[in-house]
Image (tube, rainbow, N blue to C red):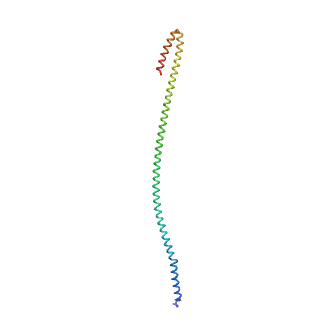
Amino acid sequence: MEKLGIEPMMLLTQIVNFTIMVVILAKFLYKPILRMLDERRKKIEEGLELTEKMKLTEESLQKEKEKVLDKARTEGQKIIEEYKLRAKKTEVEMLDLANAEIAGLKMKAKKEIEEERKRLVEDLNKQVLSIAISMTKTFVAQILDKKGQEELIERKLRKLEKESVHVN
């Protein structure tokens, strides 16, 4: 081997050195690297599992969100319909109240008109009676004596009173 340029002692030393280096590297470098790679692989697997769980959780939350939104829409529609019904009921009540108030005002106006008509008829009767009395006095004074005038006036007054009572 010496002819080949290989020294056996040197080769043996290099083999021992290489074995020591392999043992040291295996113990201090290779095993920690393998352990670190194994931990890294585990963390990646856990991360993937966590990602999958989060994806499933997100899907279930999305479904729950849709359910809640649908429920909120349904309840919102119910509330809107309820308030529409209340508004319609309030509108009807207000119209009924307004109609009742209008009817009351009409009755009051009719009553006031009737009272005014009665008052005017009474005033007219009094004026007619007054005119008739003064005309009668004037006419009778010219025709009859005092006693005849009084009897004629009395008869005419009674007749006018009866007629005025029939007009009312």
Q: Position of residue 132 (x, y in %)?
A: 52, 16
Residue 132 vs 86, above or below: the answer is above
Residue extending farthest top = 145
Q: Position of residue 42 (x, y in %)?
A: 48, 70
Query: How many marks are shown on the rendered structure?
Result: 0
Q: Pick the residue in front: 30 or 11.
A: 30
Residue 77 vs 167, above or below: the answer is below
Q: Position of residue 1 (x, y in %)?
A: 51, 90
Q: Pick the residue in front: 134 or 155.
A: 155
Residue 137 vs 32, above or below: the answer is above
Residue 88 vs 7, above or below: the answer is above
Q: Position of residue 144 (x, y in %)?
A: 52, 9
